[in-house]
Every structure is written in structure tokens, then in C-alpha cells.
Amino acid sequence: MPRTPVGLRLDPLTSAYGTYGDLSATRTAARGNRRAGRVEGRPVGTRTGMFKRALWQGLIAGTAGGVVMTLGEKLEQAVTGRPDSHVPARVLQRLSGLPEHPGKQPLPVNWAMHFGQAAALGVLRSVMAHAGLRGPLASAKFTVVRLTNDQILENATGVGAPPPTWPRRELAVDVLHKTVYAFVTGVVADALARRSSGLGPGQRHAALRPGRRPGVGPLPRGEAYGR
């Protein structure tokens, strides 16, 4: 049996070795693909490798989203006269055991929570992108995640109250800025994932039979991030 060249991808169902292929040849090809890196835009490698990429890419994407969100907040405050929020600082103080201060909170503490939370959640959006969940719809889903994360921390620490009790204008402003964050983070995360990994497994699965179709079988195991 000929040796499979490094980088040659075999379809485990209909490969050059016959229908359903030779399992040893398929495994050899999969190992070759992992050594060779990305082949024809297909995600190869281990879950560990994917998570490593998602970590640094997500931190970049989340930070970018946090910066753009903050600039938007400052612009909105200049127009509406809304004062700075010190909720992030109070949440971090209660989570970490830092002493609380009445009134205005220390700016470094406020920013640490504000940007730290933005960067950390960006990792999740990057994982979504690498899995193949990209575009505006994925970012809309991520907006809900961001809002939910805020409310869990704020309500659990007693700093905040459930959004239905907020003034409508305050609620609308918060949703607007978190939406900006989520979509900017999504644009950056999607671009980085596309550049490093090509299409995600979910996208390639959908491409097997385009459109809304039931009963499409799974991708070959070597074409995804499983084992």
C-alpha cells in the first residue's frame, strides 16, 4: 500500500483506498494534515490547537469590541449628559473582596472590570467563529450572552437589579452599547478565525447540501475538532 504524502487529505468514506477506505491510511492522512497545518482552508489539528488560537484571537477581538464600545459610550454621554457608571468597579470589588468606596469608584478598578470582561468574553466569540458560527446572526446570539453575563454578575453581587426594573431609557442605552461591543467583537473574531483556519466545521457541514435541508450526515471525524 503506498504511503500517504503529508498534506494529502483522504475522504474516509470514499478515498483512493476504496469505499470507506483503509482506516490506517485515513489515520495516516489525518496525522499528515495536522503536521502540514491548514489544507485548502479546512480546519485541521487538535481541539487544543483550536482553543489556543481562540484564546489569543478572542482576547484581541474582545478588547477591540470593548474599545469601540467605550468610544461609543463617551460619544453618547457627551450628547445625553449621562454620568459615568461605576457598576463595573463595584462588581469587581465584591467579587474580589476589595474594599468598597462610597460614591465615585477608582478609575483603574472600573476599567479593569470593564475591559477585562470585554476581553474575556471575546474568547467565547472566537470559539464560536472557529466552530463555524460566524456573521451577524452569531453576533446577535453573542449579544445575548454579553447582556446575560453582565446581569448574572451584577445581580449576584447585589450591585444591580433585574433589567425589567430599570428606566426604559437606561435599558435601551445599555442594550445599544452591548450590541455594538458584540458585533465589533464578532467582526474581528470572524476575520481572525477565517484567516487562520478557513471555514469552520459547521460551515463546511452546511456546505455539503446548501439550503435548509434535513438529514445531512456529519462531517468525517478528521475534518472537525473532535477525536
Image (cartoon, rainbow, N blue to C red):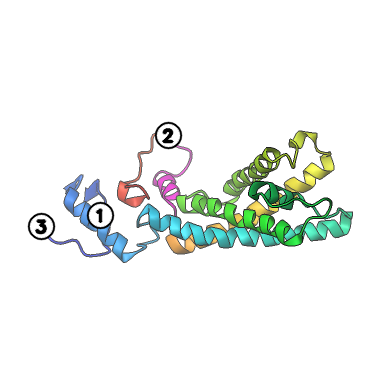
Question: Distance from label 3 to label 1 (Cα)?
Answer: 14 Å
Residue drawn at the location 75% of the way across and 49% of the way down:
87
Residue at the disc numbered 1: 10
| Screen quadrant of the N terminus | bottom left
Residue drawn at the location 19% of the way across and 61% of the way down:
4
Secondary structure found at label 3 = loop
Amino acid type, residue under disc 3 in the picture: Met
Residue at the disc numbered 2: 214
Q: Quadrant of residue 198?
A: bottom left
> Marks 2 and 3: which is nearer the front?
3
Amino acid type, residue under disc 1 in the picture: Leu
Crowding at mark 3 (Cα within 10 Å: few <14, some 14-19, many 20+): few
Question: Which of disc 1 and disc 3 is earlier in sequence?
Answer: 3
173 left or right of 28 in image:
right
Question: Which of disc 3 and disc 2 is earlier in sequence?
Answer: 3
Tell me residue 34's x, y (percent). Answer: 31, 60
| Residue 198 shows up from this direction | no
Secondary structure found at label 1 = loop
Residue drawn at the location 71% of the way across and 58% of the way down:
109
> Which sits in the foreground, 156 or 79?
156
Residue at the disc numbered 3: 1
Question: Distance from label 2 to label 3 (Cα)?
Answer: 38 Å
Q: Residue furthest left?
A: 1
Crowding at mark 1 (Cα within 10 Å: few <14, some 14-19, many 20+): many
Secondary structure found at label 2 = loop
Tell me the magenta residue range: 199-214
